[in-house]
Image (tube, rainbow, N blue to C red):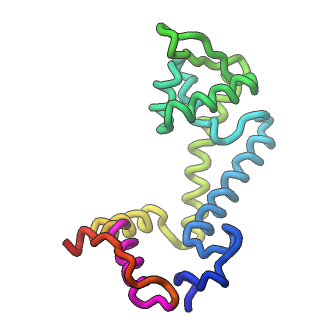
Amino acid sequence: MTSSEPPEASARPHTIDDLPSAWRPFRALQQRMDDGIAEAYTALGIEGVPTRFSAALMFLEDGAMSIRDLAERCGVTHSAMSQSVAAMRKSGLVDSEPGEDARSRIVSLTDHGREVAPQLWNEWYATERAVREVADEAGISLDEVVTSMSAALDRESFTDRLLRQMREDSTRAQGFPTSQSFPKSQGDR
C-alpha cells in the first residue's frame, strides 16, 4: 500500500498531521515566507499589523470606503472583511463610522494606518521580487508550474480526477465496500 491509498480502519491516522497531504509542503512554504514578512515588519518597526491586513491598509490609502467595497478590492467576503476591520480598529490602524444606511460602515485609516500604508506598498512589491528570486534560485518557475497544472486541469477537471480515483480505489481496495456508487465524471458521460 502506498501513502496515497486509504488504510484499513484500524490503521487510520489519528491527527491531521498523520494524513498524507500534497498541500502540506506548499502551505508550510507559504507560512515560512509569511513568517518572514512578519519578521520584516518587526525589523521595519511596523507593529500590530498582521500580514493579512496588508492589502486592506494599502487600498485604504486611496481614501475611505465601505467595508463591502474594501472586501471586493481585497477579494474576500464581506463577513471576513468586517472581522478584519474590527481587528484593525482594535489595533488602532483604522476608524469606522456609519455609512449612508444603517447596514454599511465606512472605513478610513488612522494616523498610524497612514504611517504604515506606504511601507506596506513597498513590502508587497519587494515580497514579489523575493519570491521570484527564491524560485529562480531553486530553478523553477512558479508561473510555469501553475500554467502546466491549469492546462492539465483543462484536460480533465479536478472533480473528474477525484471521482475517478475514488472509483478505482473502490474496485481495488481490500476491506472497503465495493458496491459504493460514485458519480461518473464528466469525461465518462
Identify which residue is drawn at 66% across, 63% down. Answer: 28
Taking the view exactly as shown, the residue that stands out farthest to the left is 189
Q: How many marks?
A: 0
Residue 117, placed above or below residue 76: above
The x and y percentages for residue 78 are 51, 30
What span is in magenta?
Answer: 159-174
- Magenta highlight on residue 150: no
124 with respect to 43 (left or right): left
State the quadrant of the N terminus: bottom right
The x and y percentages for residue 61 are 57, 23
Identify which residue is drawn at 57% across, 10% down. Answer: 98
Q: Nearer the viewer, residue 175 or 142?
A: 175
- Magenta highlight on residue 168: yes
Residue 177, placed above or below residue 185: below
The x and y percentages for residue 89 are 70, 23
166 with respect to 88 (left or right): left
Q: Nearer the viewer, residue 5 or 22?
A: 5
Dividing the picture into quadrants, the one containing residue 153 is: bottom left
Dividing the picture into quadrants, the one containing residue 156 is: bottom left
Q: Nearer the viewer, residue 172 or 57?
A: 172
The x and y percentages for residue 54 are 62, 36
Residue 48, placed above or below residue 150: above
Q: Main secondary structure of the magenta part?
A: helix
Taking the view exactly as shown, the residue that stands out farthest to the top is 100
Identify which residue is drawn at 37% across, 72% down. Answer: 163
Q: Nearer the viewer, residue 130 or 156?
A: 156
Identify which residue is drawn at 19% across, 71% down. Answer: 189
155 with respect to 145 (left or right): left
